[in-house]
Image (tube, rainbow, N blue to C red):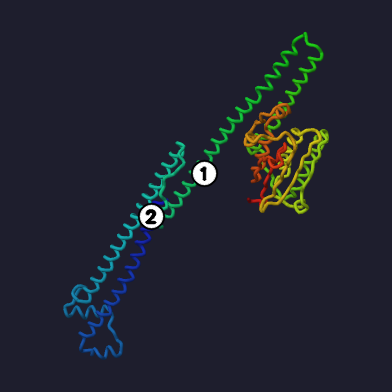
Amino acid sequence: MKFQKKWLTILLAGILILALDGILIAGEYGHYQEKYQMAAILLEEEHGASEILKNGNFPSFEEARQTLARYGYEGIRSSFFGNEFLNHSIWILGGSAVFFLFLVFLIFYTENRQKKEQDLILNEICRMLEEFRNGNFRTNLLWEHLEDDQIQRKNIYMQMESLGSYFETLKDQAYKEKENTKSLVTDISHQLKTPIAALKACLEILEQEDLTQEERREFLKRCKDQMTGLELMSAALIQISRMETGMIELQIEKKRIFDTVLGAVNRILPKAETKEMEIELDIPDSLQTAILPHDSKWMGEALMNLLENAVKYSQQNGRIRVAMERWMSFVKISIEDDGIGIPKKEQHKIFQRFYRGSSKKVRQEQGTGIGLFLTREIIDRHYGTIKVVSDDKKKKNGSIFQIQLPISENA
């Protein structure tokens, strides 16, 4: 198709040049005839040249040719006018031929240059694709130094460079997911060893026939506790895996953050009442109607995890304080308890997956070490932060978890 287009262009250019040559030569021939007729008039003195010019009775070209022939001017080359006409025609045809050849050369040169440019681009693309296949996504194309008339080549190189960056991002994401999966599998296998070993030991003991009814009930209770722990862990792991794999997406909507906080408090109230604990809300009126972009379900889950830990690790008749305040472009939510507290050396570890701390009280309570990890993941996806602080000024037990959530949806 491209070959036919090239020759069609050359053919049309040739036809146009020939047509233009015909027009120019026809004009020259007309001038030649006029001069020939004037020469015949000047030679025919008997008719009176002035009289002919006055009356406009010009002889025809054939009559003028016959008149000049009688004086020995036979043929077009026998006169100055004829030679002038021939010379002008030759110059017109010669110039047109040179212009046509130059045009053909220009077409072939342009096509050849474009072909070389395309071959160069294709070779660069093939080289880059080979690099991509070998895992090297950092391109080495100096497209910034290309000339302005090489805009097509520049655009292609920019797109290939962008594609390489995208592939590199995908590679990094795949590597991180692989490492996260390896870490998760390692953590799960490690966490399952203890309850499975305990279950196995209890079942082996229960197989013994010399156990008393009291001992049998004790070991059955231990088996039930271990099964409950495994059930809690499996439920938490399902939540984490769904969130990390993108199966659960946050539905960010502009809602009252107070309603989400109050919902989490209402959910924990039954457990708090069993320990006769008091939950105090310290939320200004201005923040009770504050609208904040968040997923109320998952944010409620995060707050519920913190409140549940506060109840679990606090003494009978304890107190939990839930406060909110406005900090410039953030809303700060604080959950304070008077429980066993968290040692400073462990405060940077508690948000790690499966970490439960070294306290004997913590080990005695049922738990998986996943709640705070999931809470941090939820807060991170809301572009917020969470940290735990100790109230050193009052020198008392307990922990204060502080959550900061941006007011702007695009923060």
Q: How far apart are marks 2 and 1 (CA)?
A: 39 Å
* Residue 32 in the image: above or below residue 226: below
* Residue 349 in the image: above or below residue 38: above
- Mark 2 vs mark 1: in front: 1
Can you identify the residue that label 1 sits on? 166
Q: Which residue is drawn at 78% across and 53% down?
A: 285
* Residue 23 in the image: above or below residue 208: below
Camera-nearest residue between 399 and 23: 399
User: Where does the image place residue 329, in percent across and percent down from the top left?
Assistant: 66, 53
Can you identify the residue that label 2 sits on? 6
User: Where does the image place residue 160, in percent across and percent down from the top left?
Assistant: 47, 46
Q: Residue 368 carries which label?
A: none
- Disc 2, SS: helix
Dot 2: within a 10 Å radius of its alpha carbon, few (fewer than 14), some, or many (20 or more) residues?
A: some
- Disc 1, SS: helix
Q: Earlier in the sequence, mark 2 or mark 1?
A: 2
Q: Identify which amino acid the numbered label 1 is placed on.
A: Tyr
Q: Residue furthest top?
A: 210
Q: Which residue is drawn at 70% across and 51% down?
A: 326
Camera-nearest residue between 57 and 373: 373
Q: How many marks?
A: 2
Q: Which residue is drawn at 30% across and 86% down?
A: 57
Camera-nearest residue between 379 and 57: 379
User: Where does the image place residue 295, in percent across and percent down from the top left?
Assistant: 71, 45
